[in-house]
Amino acid sequence: MKIRGERECTQCGTRWSYYETGSIGCPACGSLHSVGLDERTEHTDLRIEFDLTPVRADIDEVPTDELAERARDRCREYVRRRGFVNAGDLRDLDDAYLVAAELLHVADIVVRELDLEEREALYFLSLLRDADDDERPPPEEVPRTLRAGRGLAYANAVREYRREIRTWTDDRELTAAERSALETLGEHVKRVRMLDGDISPRTAERLVQATRELANGLRGDELAFMQAQDRLEELAVASPE
């Protein structure tokens, strides 16, 4: 959505930036009545805290499936409210979003799985321990039985990020190569989703890397754009593994 981020309170005259506070309320008097001072700018990056501390606090008191259900709810809310365009600037597809998305999907598997193996439970607990510190487990640590959780999480994350890129480029003229790269990225996402995320964690990682390089390329880094094109081409010939 496009908003006027620089605000002035009509009650007390205080000026503040919605982009920094994430609140329409005046930080001085609390009034909700203000006027915009700048041009309308695309802004989807809502300020939201990702904190799993309350869930971890009960780790010794409640069953694993209940922990997973609570973690899933917190991750779903965080992912739902996050965005990637801040005051007209395209932000990165960051680790915080990726690991929250993975925990969301892995927790859903844990909730539904009746006979959870020890390695699966330990991996879920490792995500719960580190996710709100933006720590993503390396691909080799993902259990074979949970790789679809990471694959689908990353595919969905890239899908949402690609949508935000589209929003960000609405007022920009893309080259044919840039449009082609974005379309190819979308095709890879569709393929992974058709496989229900059942790809190797390394392939999922390459999808993320290609997305990040493409974003840097669209922001003006020509070398990153060429790297993105090469990586997208490699993904096109890669097997599901």
Image (cartoon, helix red, strand yellow):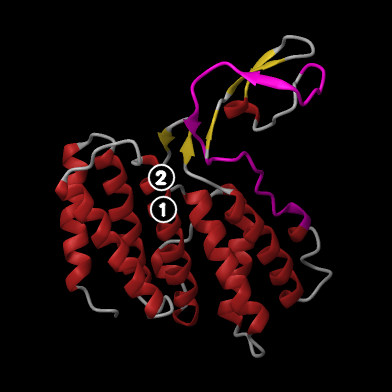
Q: Which residue is mark 1?
A: 163
Residue 123 found in image quarter: bottom right
The image quadrant where one finds the C terminus is: bottom left
What residue is drawn where x is 59% and y is 78%?
109
Residue range corresponding to the magenta coloring: 28-54
Give the numbered dot on residue 204: none
What residue is drawn where x is 82% and y is 18%?
29
Q: Nearer the viewer, residue 88 or 124?
A: 88
> Helix or strand or loop: what does disc 2 sit on?
helix
Image coords of residue 103 (percent x, y): 58, 64
Image coords of residue 197 (percent x, y): 42, 75
Residue 157 located within the stretch drawn in magenta: no
Residue 202 found in image quarter: bottom left
Residue 36 located within the stretch drawn in magenta: yes
Q: Which residue is mark 2?
A: 167
- Tell me the crowding category of disc 1: few under 14, some 14 to 19, or many 20 or more residues within 10 angstroms, Cα based: some
- The three-letter code of the residue at mark 1 reads Arg
Image coords of residue 89 (percent x, y): 41, 33
Give the left or right position of residue 105, taking residue 92 as reference.
right
Q: Nearer the viewer, residue 158 or 166?
A: 166
Kindly check if marks 2 and 1 are in contact, taking CB atoms under 8 A apart as contact: yes
Give the left or right position of residue 89, taking residue 79 as reference.
left
Q: Mainly helix, strand or loop, the magenta region? A: loop
Residue extending furthest toward the top: 13
Would you say residue 3 is visible in this rendering?
Answer: yes
Would you say residue 135 is visible in this rendering?
Answer: no
What residue is drawn where x is 43% and y is 39%?
91
Image coords of residue 127 (percent x, y): 58, 62
